[in-house]
Structure formats: structure tokens, C-alpha cells
Image (cartoon, grey):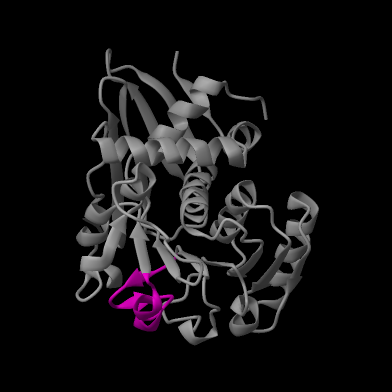
Amino acid sequence: MTLLISDAEVAATLDAATTVAAMRDALLAAHAGHLVAPPRAAAPLAGGRLVLTAGQLVGEWYGYRSYDTFGHPGTEQLVVLHDARTGAVRAVAVGEELGSRRTGGLGGVAVDALARPDAATVGVLGSGRQAWTQLWATAAVRDLREVTVHSPNPAHRTAFAARVHAELGVPARPVDSASAAVRDRDVVLVATTSVTPVLAAADLAPGTHLNVVGFKQLDRHEFGTDLLDAAEVLVTDSPAQAGAYLPPMLAALPPYAGRLRDLGAVLAGAVPGRTGADQVSVFCSTGLAGTEVFLLDRMVRVGVAPA
């Protein structure tokens, strides 16, 4: 029987620790060649695109996620999990929660692998779903002491700070500028919809780790090349996807492409991550294909909790 899974059931089943652990396993599987994760494909349609990210855990399952760029307020993502032995559809997740938690989980793995072990303060730029899941996962891998948050809407950043305190038990405060949010922070999470840079590398303290989740392409980017110049450790979850962006992803262009490391390779010890306390490290999230299906499989295996 095919399981049909809602956002509410995803939220009831997947806590941050489970999600981060699944994404760590997925990245290691991709590095070892067990998770086949080709770059995303897109079909141009009238007024938008239909985007597909597919993946396969060899001998276990295959599946895909689909979403569109039409911008309809009610648009939902679809994640489909097939049994590799029979072709049967084991589960289908409809909504936004699985994809958001997947992206947050990848960010949590990056923070755990690249941030200083004693990192305890976080600056957040953005106050939406992606900003929340990045922080949610970060709180699972570090003992946080304080969070500062900035977004252009004062009500949104105030509500975000209140949610941090209520749900994560971490003191949090909204601030009036991006520079105030990131200054002297151990970890900075950038998850905005801005098409122009929202932070300056000069505002960062030595040793800061950053996750950048929003636009990062040549024609639109929430950070500038000053951040890439400052990054002594530059990492992504899928170098293949980074290289396949159209227009190109900033970090996949010269002179940065030669420094862009694979997070799975860092986890496996094949390439170094952070080697000094004062290094600035940057994780450019692309959303490794197949990880949504990997997370759906993990969710089914642990048992779907009732909403």
C-alpha cells in the first residue's frame, strides 16, 4: 500500500536530530557512489518551469521531487519513493515541509562539520521557512547561547525571535540591520529571497561559519564575491549541481571553482574542512538531488507519526 504523507505528518515525525543524521548519511552515500544524484532537470512551460530532482540509492529505492516556478500561492511539492526491487510506489509526500526540513538538515550537517566546536552564537538573515529550518537544525548540532535575526519586515523578525525562544529555548532578539545581526557571531545563516547582497564580509568576525541558502547565481545573489574572497573554506553539497546552474553559480566560477569542496568528501575525510579556529568557512547549499527521497525513505523506516 502506498503511504500518502502530509506536511503535518512530516512535522510530527521528523525531528532535527533525525533529519540531520539522515542528511549526513545521504552525503556520505553520495560520496561513496551509492546515492546516484544527477543535477536537477527543468522543463520550460508557459509562464514558468517544472523542475525535477531525481535520486537512487542503488539496490534500495529510486524516486524524485517535482516543483514548479509559476509562483501560485497554493503550489505544493511532490516527493515520490519507489521500491527499487519491484518498482512499486512506497510513499508520496505532498507539501513543503519535507523539502524544507531536508534543506535545513543539510545545513545542520554543514554547521556540524565546518563551524568551530564551541560555536554558540548565531546570526540569521531572513525570517521565512528556510531561515527557520536552518536554525532548527543548527540547534541540534550546537549548544546555542544567543540568536540575533534581521529581515526587512520588523514584525516578521520579531515573530521569528519569539518563535526561537518558544520552540528552541534559546534567547533571541530582532535587530535593525544585517550588520548588527552578523557581527561577532560564530555562525551566520543567510536564507533570503534577495537578488542583491544582504551582508558584507567585512562585518564578519574571524572564524565565522556561514550557510548561504538563497540566490547565489551570477545574475542574482544574496551575497557578493567579497564573501567568497574571504572564505578560506568553501564547500557545497553537490559540486555537480553547482556547476550545472544556469546562469552559473558564483562559487562554481573562476577563481572560486578550484576551491569549492564537496561536503560529502569532507565528512568522509577525503578532503579537509576547517583546519584553524580563525578561518571563515562558507557552505553554499544547492540541495543535493535525491536527498528529499532519502529523507522520505528514512521517515517511512522510522514510522510515520500521526499528525
Q: Is residue 226 magenta?
A: yes
Identify the residue at horizontal 32%, vertical 35% (top origin): 29
122 versus 83 height, above or below:
below
Q: Position of residue 191 (x, y in %)?
A: 51, 65
Compared to residue 64, the image places residue 60 above or below, namely above
Q: Tell me the quadrant of the picture where the C terminus can be found.
A: top right
Expressed as whole percent of the image width and height from the top left, the position of residue 184 reads: 62, 77
Residue at point 68% right, 53% down? 143
Q: Is residue 278 above or below residue 291?
A: below
Magenta span: 214-232
Front residue of this view, candidates 122 and 192 = 122
Q: Position of residue 8 (x, y in %)?
A: 63, 36
Give the x, y percent position of residue 193: 48, 70
The one nearer the camera, 270 or 128, is 270
Locate residue 39 relative to residue 95 in the image: left or right.
left
Quarter holding the N terminus?
Answer: top left
Residue 256 to residue 73: above or below: below
- The quarter holding residue 297 reads top left
